[in-house]
Image (cartoon, rainbow, N blue to C red):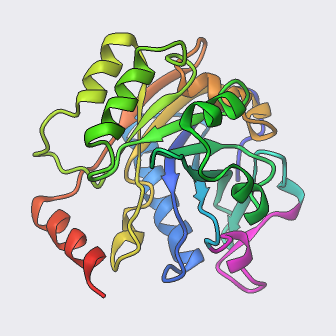
Amino acid sequence: MMNEQNDFGISLDTHVHFYDGFGASELLEHAWTNLSQSIRSRGLRNAIPAVIWTRQQRESALAGQLPEGSAWQVREDSKTDAGFRVQAMDGRELFVFRGVQFVSAEGLEVLVGALPDHSDAFIGAYQGKPVRELLDSFCDEYPVILPWGFGKWLGKRGQIILELLDSEYAGRFVLGDNSGRPAFWSPVKAFVKAAQVRVPVVPGTDPLPVSGQIRHVGRSGVLLDHFPSAVFENGALLREALLKRSPYQVARFDRREALLSFFLNQLKMRLP
């Protein structure tokens, strides 16, 4: 069972999608197993596995895929503006922060966590707005992640990320890495720049909608420590933690894609 005291840790996958081909209970089982492994490897006590479910417009609702009798169930008494708990039949629990994935006018992904509204109408109202307008709308109240993706930070889009890191917005958002970026990949310019200006880079799984990716959920993320339970009620505390604001401690864990798997996944994404 989740610990209710005011000093605990969180093992958090910062970028999770639920696709139609995924089984909800299977996804949560892999998430719990992988996140719990990172907790044990670091020797954290009173730590809780958690994910930021970054819903895209018209993407299936995770909670809606857990009917009565499923191996994992939503705890109805746990729902807050930030998210909800899910519980396995044997009592194991995991917290799901509601998140939304927007695509800016420039074609950049903007992830916003712990949002009370994640409906299609809400996502649609902000979809396609300039990235700076999206940052102005969310980054002072919620955790905002600009995630790396294969080919998504090339050319003009990559330059926009670098410009944001040199602007007044630096320190108000974090960059996102993901387990799909292979270990052999050359250094990402934006990550190098982020280190120079002290903008955190937080890993997440960002699973692809292809066979086998569901097993990766929970393999990459951050470990956060010394949390009050209020983090599950609104996004402000989670925002402060991801921005590495005191008193929270942040450590990364990241299991990268192998070379062959990376190319096979890219091929599957492009097949009809």
Q: Residue at x 70, y 65 (%)?
A: 87
Say if the magenta span includes residue 73.
yes
Visible residue check, residue 211: yes
Q: Residue at x 51, y 57 (%)?
A: 16
Visible residue check, residue 8: no
**Residue 204 percent across, percent down from the top left:** 42, 47
**Residue 146 percent across, percent down from the top left:** 47, 38
Residue 266, compared with residue 102, is above or below; it is below
Say if the magenta span includes residue 270.
no
Count of all numbered marks drawn on residues in the image:
0
Task: Name the side, left or right, on which 132 lies relative to 190.
Answer: right
Residue 236, compared with residue 39, is above or below; it is above
Q: Nearer the viewer, residue 190 or 108?
A: 108
**Residue 80 percent across, percent down from the top left:** 84, 48
Q: Residue at x 69, y 33 (%)?
A: 138
Image quarter hosting the C terminus: bottom left
**Residue 207 percent across, percent down from the top left:** 40, 63
Q: Residue at x 30, y 28 (%)?
A: 190
Q: Which residues are magenta?
A: 60-76
Asked which quadrant contains residue 65, the reply is: bottom right
Residue at the right extreme of this rendering: 77
Residue 245, compared with residue 238, is above or below; it is above
Asked which quadrant contains residue 196, the reply is: top left
Task: Name the side, left or right, on which 186 lies relative to 241.
Answer: left
